[in-house]
Image (cartoon, rainbow, N blue to C red):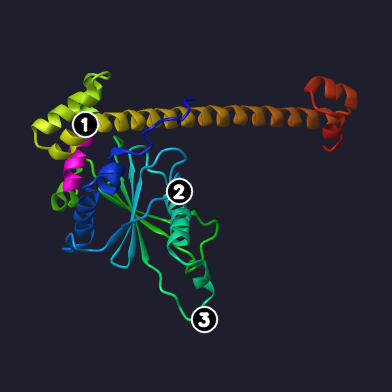
Amino acid sequence: MTKHNRRYKDSVFVDFFGEDKNAKTNFLSLYNALHDTHLDASTELEALRLEQVMYMAFRNDVAYLIDGKIIALTEHQATINANMPLRFLQYAARLYERIQNPRDRYLKYLKKIPTPEFYVFYNGEEDYPEKATLQLSDAFMTLPEKPALEVVVSVTNINYTKGSRILHTCKPLKEYALFVEAVRKHLKLDTENGFKNAIKECIQNDILREYLQRKSREVVNMLIAEYDYDVDIAVQREEEREIALQEGISEGSYQAKLETAKLMRTHNYPITEICTMTGLSETEVERL
């Protein structure tokens, strides 16, 4: 499998909403769209960056401290992972460790902490509803009437064809969605020049024009890293499926041997003969 040893480990999504010189403006637009507010550039916000949290070697997440909240965003282009609430829980724990004084947890009085909010923006090609909610409690082995711990993740399909409301209230996210659509289209037409052609078309159509004119080379490199990462993940999942299949076959074969050995024992075959016929050890046969 390809090793992740690249200079570009951030996605375009992360750069556009979290790292670029205009990232905070873009994020504020998104925040206002999510909360129906009108916060402006004078609003205090702090970018919270953690290395290699949501993904092992590729960052696709953005987090800000704003208005008494921790807003954590991630982009998803593959199949929506049902374990996102657990991953956000681990993510949030590390964020709180970063922003809180370790001694605060021992104070006698209640120490207020920022309210966490978790958002996933899906722009993959699989059919997915416009809105969905994932909950940590869905993963609990036993579910009490009132879970002692809960994490709620809001998932929004930002594929432009889905017509999500937020795309009409947040111009940066709308243009980003159109950009992703253009990249996908041009890659299918020309895998070698698809990224460059998509950027050219978007600039001509006034989609992320200023951003792409200023950072076209970096964007191409980020897109290449994203594409390679997605391929790696797809290969890894295929390998995992093959391993699971082989393990299933092996388990089935072993069970068949046990059933054969049981049958032979009921007919009083010698243990040594049973071992020869099934390949089981004497200890395994004697346990039957």
Q: Which mark is residue 108?
A: 3
Give the image quarter of residue 153.
Answer: bottom left
- The residue under label 1 is 216
The answer to whether residue 122 is seen in the rendering is no
Is residue 144 shown in magenta? no
Q: Please tell me which residue is depicted at 45% across the width and 53% down the height of the picture.
A: 91
The magenta region covers 172-180
Which residue of the protein is positioned furthest toward the left in this rendering?
A: 205
Q: Earlier in the sequence, mark 3 or mark 2?
A: 2
Q: Nearer the viewer, residue 204 or 36?
A: 204
Q: Indicate the position of residue 60 as horizontal and vertical percent values.
A: 36, 43
Q: Amino acid at mark 2?
A: Asn
In screen coordinates, is 281 left or right of 209? right
Label 1 crowd (10 A; few <14 / some 14-19 / many >=20)? some
Q: Residues within 10 Å of mark 3 (few under 14, many from 20)?
A: few
**Residue 6, picture quadrant:** top left
The residue labelled by disc 2 is 83
